[in-house]
Image: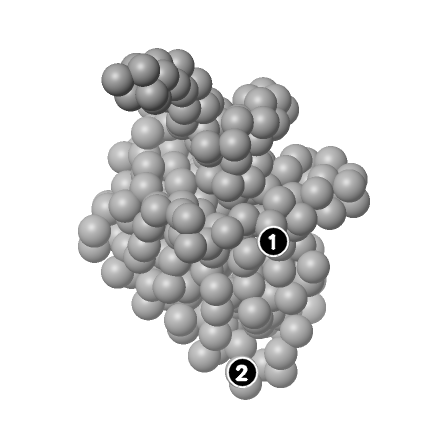
Amino acid sequence: MRTSAVLALAVCLLTPVVARAQDAIAETRRLYNAGQYEEAERVARAALEVPATANSAKVVFGRVLLERYRQSAAPEHLAEGRAALRDADPTLLDPRERVELTLGFAETLFFEDRFAAAAELFEPAVEASARLALPEHERVLDWWATALDRYAQTRPLQERALLYGRISRRMTAELARNIASVPAGYWLVAAARGSGDLDGAWSLAMANWLRAVLARDRGAALRGDLDRLMVQAIIPDRAARMAARDTTAVITGLLAEWESFKAGWAK
């Protein structure tokens, strides 16, 4: 009876500790999704100190440090993030955590400029990430498309259309599921431009400029991205293709047309 009482007491003492550590992991995920990476790192480091949840904490901690690396380019963030992901034991992770670990591997490959390998790891995780929070799913979708885009830019022109076709098909399917998808709205336009379909990119930019108001931020992020893509890439590309004697005048005219379109829908 005395032994049983001791064990019961031990369980009672341990349960709040484990619960607090699990709460810390959930809080790390919340901060990660909110883009508060410094605070997420602080909470994750504390969760690493609890043996019962240290393995799970390695996954979220590793991904937080990869985001820190994206912001800072500090090599120690990449090295420590890679080490945390490498040291996590996949056999002890639940299905959600296994998806997160896979994403961490893919992000690491991306930062190492191994874009084709990163895209292959990201692609099956796009569907799996639909079970995560919407910001996480959209982040994965954007990661995958960005990796494939970076890879496409290293390939001969005849191969690029096939790679951008993969992006276009995926984003079309995504919009069928979520008409307000921000990554899909951007990457449909970027893929058309990347494959050389400049007229299609122009039309898609207009369509997705309007669709952007359905997003949670009422289109602020997507419209900014589309505007930069139009001004810095699509319009110069169209002007160059027209082979006009005065390219500057053509660019000025196309810019005026784009601004007129936006003004017509301004409130």
Image-based side of 265 in relation to 110, left or right: left
Image-based side of 226 in relation to 180, left or right: right
The quarter in which the C terminus is drawn is top left
Q: Residue at the location (70% across, 43% down)?
A: 80
Residue 77's place in the image compared with 92, above or below, is: above
What kind of element bears circle 2?
helix
Judging by the rendered image, the residue that carries numbered circle 2 is 159
Front residue of this view, candidates 165 and 238: 165
Front residue of this view, candidates 235 and 150: 150
Residue 245 seen in the current view: yes
How far across and how far down the image is residue 26, in percent? 40, 27
The quarter in which the N terminus is drawn is top left
Q: Residue furthest right?
A: 75
Residue 188's place in the image compared with 165, above or below, is: above
Q: Residue furthest left?
A: 177
N-terminal of the pair, mark 1 or mark 2, is: 1
Image-based side of 145 in relation to 233, left or right: left
What kind of element bears circle 1?
helix
Front residue of this view, candidates 30 and 181: 30
CA gap, disc 1 to disc 2? 33 Å
Q: Residue at the location (62% across, 45% down)?
A: 84
How far across and how far down the image is residue 88, in percent? 54, 49
Judging by the rendered image, the residue that carries numbered circle 1 is 86
Residue 42's place in the image compared with 108, above or below, is: above
Q: Residue at the location (63% across, 38% down)?
A: 65
Mark 1 or mark 2, which is nearer to you?
1
